[in-house]
Amino acid sequence: MNHTMSAKSASDLHQVSDRLAHNALRNVNERLIELVLFAAAAVSVLTTVGIVYVLVSESIHFFQNVSIVDFLTDNQWTPLFDDAHYGIMVLISGTLVSSGVALAVAIPMGTIIAIYLSEFANPKVREVAKPVLELLGGIPTIVFGYFALLIVTPLLQKIFPELPGFSLLSAGLVMGIMIVPYIASLSEDAMRAVPMSMREGSYAMGATKLYTAIHVVVPAAVSGLAASYILGISRAVGETMILAVAAGMQPNLTWNPMEPAATITSYIVQVALGDLPHGSIGYQTIFAAGLTLLLITLVFNIIGQWLRRRYREAY
Amino acid sequence: MQPMTTEQIRALIARGKLKDTLFQAIGILCLGIGLLVIFLLVGDMLMRGMERLNIEFFTEFASRRASQSGILSAWVGTLLVMLVTAAAAVPLGVAAGIYLEEYAKRNWVTDIIEINITNLAAVPSIVYGLLALGIFVYTFGFGQSILSAGLTLALLILPIVIVATREAIRSIPAMIREGSMAVGATRWQTCRYHIIPYAMPGILTGVIIGLARAIGETAPIITIGALTFIAFLPPAPFAPTGMDGATAGMFDWVMSPFTVMPIQIFNWTSRPDPAFEVNAAAAGFVLMGMVLSMNAVAIWLRYRMRKNIKW
């Protein structure tokens, strides 16, 4: 009896120690898994670090050869010619003009669609319209480039016969259409977040729907609207293929949308299409251009975040 | 201020109503323009590209003669690049999403990761191309291969997958986790057997939307220097490579040069000969078909999900 007792307790002990070992193993496993998951999340940070590292390190090589004053003030951009000039303003002008055209289309259209969908449309229309807008936003930009070059430019040439085959105008217009869904969707979300009681208050005073939308809902949602515009600007500034296809790729310091011009992005594409040796100054220019592009989007994003905080209304 | 007569009040109300109606008309017009653009695009590409949309178009390589060109290397390239992109972006994105929702403590490390993901979504795609050119192509020495392109696009869509995963996980009520942990499951077991399966439809939607975005991306792939004229396919696994009976390895294709649909379209639109416009239209129609059907699947999935799941 004594014997069996001890055997039983021994097997109990075994069980307990087994379970403890099992638990310990389990804890180690859990820690390991958490580490793996954390590593995956850290990849996004590594991506940012990588972007900054690549752009900055190549740009440092570039600025050892080209003075930063020339880079910012020269009014020619001919890095691949014998008589090389590196005036980034040439590319920035193309970028700003095309973005300006795009936003002149996208901001009014996007805002009107957003107001219509959030304040006027019945839910059925909204259920259909939102996916359609998403589809519009999902169209590959190369297809939009084709659209700008082969459909919009000929149409515009009927109105402005002197318009060249490549122009910032047609590329910008199509870019605007491309950005509309982003602005409309984000603005609509912002306006729908405005509490119903504010609208009801306005209606109770006898205001019409349009008056309520413009004087109550839009001011209340203004931080969200600003955020959507900033996203639109980022998209416009960073858009590449529409411009590469439809705006021509010759550098041209101009503020006239009727002319062809290169942008920062289309210049990078042009160089990448050629065959520049790794480490040459021409190769480094695309990183300097890329850094400029990133800084421009960064500035707009900081402004956007500031606007959001400045005008945020909490309910 | 003088009191208004009934007529004046009526006129005021009528004016207000008229403005409302006018605005509605403008709103519908703006929406209509968006719709019109889609129809115009698809219609034009179909009409123009009709004559090239046959079987040969899918089974022929690109050629100097427009009428004999096809998109074989382009669609195979697109498929393979998407394979690499999905293989990299899905595990990474889902794992990151799970970490941020289920594991991360509220501290500065988590804050940095979150701010980072938001900012990465606003980085222009061509900048990813420059990153890939510096890191994947030259530092890691992957060259201008399917692997480089796939990883680049994976980084590009990572924020989309992460955000979709997080939203899907966030919609699962806390009682599911509590129930699971109450019967002794660990955190990972809860994730593995409850959170991930329930979040699956949402994650899938995000992955499809991300891939639909990646499939149409041109700029980053051009930036890494992908060739535009490719008249061969990447080696199939274990295919014979030469006369001495050697075979390609299982994964030799990832290091192969390639072309993808958008680059093929870009190549054709940038040629002066208008005969290539027909090819560009046909290829554009095929690409649009791919992207729109992927988006349609995602929208349908989301619609079904919203209808079926009631906690």
Image (tube, rainbow, N blue to C red):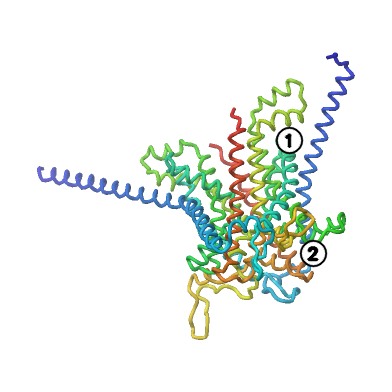
Q: Is residue A45 left or right of residue B54?
A: left
Q: Nearer the viewer, residue A267 or A15?
A: A267
Q: Residue at x 64, y 75 (%)?
A: B231
SS of the residue under disc 1 = loop
Regarding residue A141, the answer to whether it shows in the image is no
Residue B238, given in percent of the width and then of the height, sits at: 50, 75
Residue B241, given in percent of the width and then of the height, sits at: 52, 80
Q: Nearer the viewer, residue A232 or A92?
A: A92
Residue B302, given in percent of the width and then of the height, sits at: 61, 45
Label drawn at residue B37: none
Give the residue at the far left of this rendering. A2
Q: Residue at x 86, y 59 (%)?
A: A162
Label drawn at residue A122: 1
Please tell me in which quadrant of the rendered image residue A124 appears.
top right
SS of the residue under disc 2 = helix
Where, quadrant-wise, is the N terminus of chain B in this rendering? top right
Q: Amino acid at mark 2?
A: Arg
Give the residue at the far bottom of this rendering. B243
Q: Identify the subunit bearing mark 1.
A: A
Residue A282, given in percent of the width and then of the height, sits at: 60, 67
Q: Is residue B26 left or right of residue B7?
A: left
Q: Is residue B165 above or below residue B136?
A: above
Q: Amino acid at mark 1?
A: Asn
Q: Is residue A138 left or right of residue A278?
A: right
Q: Residues within 10 Å of mark 2 (few under 14, many from 20)?
A: some
Q: Residues within 10 Å of mark 1 (few under 14, many from 20)?
A: few
What residue is disc 2 on? B48
How far, Cα to Cα, is label 1 from label 2?
A: 37 Å
